[in-house]
Image (cartoon, rainbow, N blue to C red):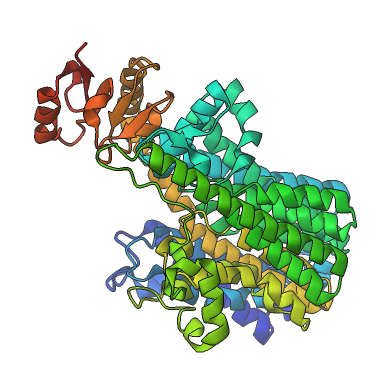
Amino acid sequence: MERKIGSAFTMENTVCRLFAAWCSFAFYLLLTSKGSFLQLEYAQTFSLLFSVLIILCIFLVCSVIHIVSKREETDSWFLLIGATLCVTYWLYKGEGIKNKFLFLMAVIAVYGIFVAYFIKKNSSFFEKIIPGKRTVWCFTLVCGLFCGTVIGTVTSLRYLTFSAPNFDFGIFVNMFHNMKETGLPDVSCERDVLMSHFAVHISPIYYLLLPFFVMFPSPLTLQIGQAIVVASGVIPVLFLCRQYKLSPKSSTAMVFLYALHPVLSTSCFYDIHENCFLAPLLLWLFYFFERKQYILMYVFSFLTLSVKEDAAVYILIFAFYLLLSKRSVCHGVSLCVIALAYFGVALTVLQKMSAYYAEFYANQTPNPQIEGPMLNRFENLIFEKEDGLLGALKTAFFNPGYFLTQLFQTNGNTWEKLTYFFQMLLPLGFLPFLTGKVSRFLLISPILLNLLTNYAYQYDVGYQYHFGILAFFIYACVMNLSELQISLRRNLLGFAIAACFCFYVVYIPSNLAYYQKAWNAKKDMYLQMDEILDSIPTEASVACPGYILPHVANRREVYEIYYHGNAGDVDYIVLDGRSSVDEQLLKTFLRQGYSVWQEYEGLLTILKRKE
């Protein structure tokens, strides 16, 4: 016991315990003090003497626990717990910070030091822990369930609180309704005319969700379906880790980093998009290549291509990786040919279909904006517009210096692209870069798709353009980890988990809390609005505001009222009266032969076209 008492008050243990006591005291102040910690005057009036006494009391309690405990490193646990509590509170409650990202960087820098110390002091403890297969599987399923539940809850609440707009959620609700009725992906509220969605984006992958929508024909089915698709990616991540013979601990860490990578969740928060399929499909593709199950590899290659016309770029990058790494020249060439051929066919189909609809609706006034393939997102790299994407390649070949000027350049000369770079890679501890194999850097290159454009949504983590990139990053992480020494692997994974946790706390709970609060505050109103809107016959055509549209999209034709140039050609008009009805718009419709069908003051006004 004397020896234990003596070891409890070495210089290192004493300093560690004092820091732990101070962190615990700081958390106590956060819970009990009034005001915000962002203010300079926060807690300044708290008694210094009383503060010291509290810290000493915590110090003594920690000392006693250290002495009576059989473990030697209890102080590092107290330090990590205290620091984690403070970090969680700061990041969650820091809404008023002007530059939250810089604050997040500062927190991660300091928190990372505590985590590194904790890992160092408990290295022998971690070596003794060897999770069994059942434990690893249970952890994987829990991570997937947690990931899917959070995503599904946030996106479902967005719909229920009338926060999901026509662009893009209403489009897909309308499309799935028509798919259920006719089998065709027709949609009326995307280009303000009834046309196939596949004239805008070729995404047959959506048919995988159609059976579930047929069984449960609700917009919530699409939101929950997206959550399940994304969360299912934990399984191929685990299989990849096993294929590379990562330890059970490293495997669970990688599953954690996938499931709680903040961008994986925020990419879903603008409602369902076909891009959500990219993460699990690409991970399965990588896994089946590693397993040399080439038939399944090609199956998932075609499934990936079916997500969207530009998904061919991901297959092409993987093909180049196979060629450059010389891991499989034959399959690299095959995938390259398949990707290029599919991309060429897809662009041709898009051009033909858009030309068909443009001609079909040529006499409509105003003329609908029916465009071909969306290549304008890289117009900053294309000199002659008729060159299309080849123009971007010409720029890269003839003028690589200009190409580099666009890498972190934005239209507003801001820092969003650099911020985006850290948002994607810091939660992974920059593990995708830790390799000496040049070919493996190709697996990082998909991020260039979002860095070289000036289309702001592509480097905004609140939108859907990041699933494929993250899948490549996870793949690179697994391969790189398998080649690192155990001690370095443990430290890097520890830092990655700490950074991922910090990012997750900043970006995810605030979204969840916002929509939960909105739902709880006006639940009855939202339910009443849905009940009113359900009274509109489903066979009737409707024009309405964007945030109303997903709730009436269960019909063949529905239009967003502020884009619809022929509002008088629909059966019903819905006006949102929660703020105030646009009186001028109301008078216009009344003059066009509509009459008030139902009116709910402060909620909705529904007009019906006279027979």
Q: How many marks?
A: 0
Residue at 54% x, 64% y: name it. 502
Q: State which quadrant residue 409 falls in.
A: bottom left
Residue 471 appearing in the image? no
Q: Position of residue 204 (x, y in %)?
A: 62, 40
Residue 390 appearing in the image? yes
Q: Nearer the viewer, residue 75 or 268?
A: 268
Q: Is residue 507 left or right of residue 473?
A: left
Residue at 33% x, 21% y: name it. 533
Q: Nearer the viewer, residue 56 or 547?
A: 547
Q: State which quadrant residue 364 falls in.
A: top left
Q: Position of residue 329 (x, y in %)?
A: 85, 69
Residue sitting farthest toward the bottom: 401
Q: Position of residue 578 (x, y in %)?
A: 21, 33
Please identify the quadrant where the C terminus is shown.
Answer: top left
Q: Is residue 604 above or below residue 99?
A: above
Q: Is residue 534 above or below residue 349?
A: above
